[in-house]
Each structure stands twice: as C-alpha cells, then as structure tokens.
Amino acid sequence: MRFLVAALIGFSFALPLPAEAQPQRLPRKSRSERQVEELNRNMQQDRRIQSLEQDFRLKNGQIRQDIERQRLFPSPPITSPYRCTPGAVRC
C-alpha cells in the first residue's frame, strides 16, 4: 500500500502540469478574404445609394406632378360669405 501511494505521488510529479490558458488568437484574414469583405461593403453601399437616388427621383416626380396639376387645375379662389364679390348686385 505504501508503495502504491509513493508511486502515485512520484507519477504526479512526473506528469506535466496544466499550462495556463493562453488567449487564442484567430488566424489573420487572408488578402482575398479582406478583398471579398471590402467588395461586399462596397456593394451594400452602392445599393443604399441607389435606393436613396430612386427615392429622390420618385419624390421629385411627385412634386413635379403636383406642380403641373396645380398649374392645369388651379383651385378656385376662396370667397368669404361676409364679403361682396366684385360686380354683385346685392350682398
């Protein structure tokens, strides 16, 4: 029994101690991965710009239509019921 305990103690010194956990670094991205990510970012930015340009063109067209509609169909003048219109016989 003593021999077994002595052997276990001896083996415990012989075994390597657990090393401290070192922070693992992620492998660096390759040049091609960085280029793909940059291309994806550029494509997303281009899509956003195109969307904004489309919104601008749509709103611009709506404003032009509103102006044209007002030009073609002007709203009637507002007359007050308490005021006589020019050329009226009675008020």
Image (tube, rainbow, N blue to C red):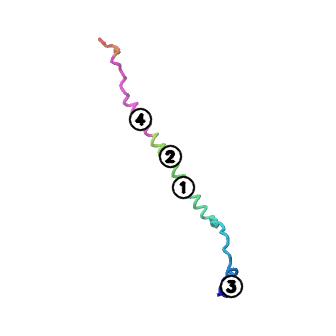
Q: Earlier in the sequence, mark 3 or mark 2?
A: 3
The answer to whether 73 is drawn above or below residue 4 in the figure is above
Q: Which residues are magenta?
A: 61-81
In the figure, residue 68 lies in which quadrant?
Answer: top left
- Residue at mark 3 to residue at mark 2: CA–CA distance: 79 Å
Verify CB contact (< 8 Å) between mark 2 and mark 1.
Answer: no
Measured in 3D between alpha carbons, the distance from the residue under mark 3 to the one under mark 1, in whole angstroms, is: 69 Å
Residue sitting at x 68%, y 82%: 9
Q: CA distance from mark 4 to mark 2?
A: 21 Å
* Mark sitting on residue 43: 1
Q: CA distance from mark 4 to mark 1?
A: 35 Å
* Residue 25, percent from left and from top: 64, 66
Viewer-nearest of labels 3 and 4?
A: 3
Q: Are marks 4 and 2 in contact (CB under 8 Å)?
A: no
Q: Amino acid at mark 2?
A: Leu
Q: Provide the residue designation for mark 3.
A: 6
The answer for how far apart the CA atoms under marks 3 and 4 are is: 98 Å
The amino acid sitting under disc 1 is Met
The tag earlier along the polypeptide, 3 or 4, is: 3
**Within-10-Å neighbours for mark 3: few <14, some 14–19, many 20+:** few
Q: Position of residue 51 (x, y in %)?
A: 49, 48
Seen at 33% across and 18% down, the residue is 81
**Residue 88 figure quarter:** top left
Place residue 75 in its image quadrant. top left
Instruction: List the residue tagged with mark 2.
Output: 52
Please tell me which residue lies in front, 33 or 75: 33
Crowding near pointer 4: few (<14 within 10 Å), some, many (20+)?
Answer: few
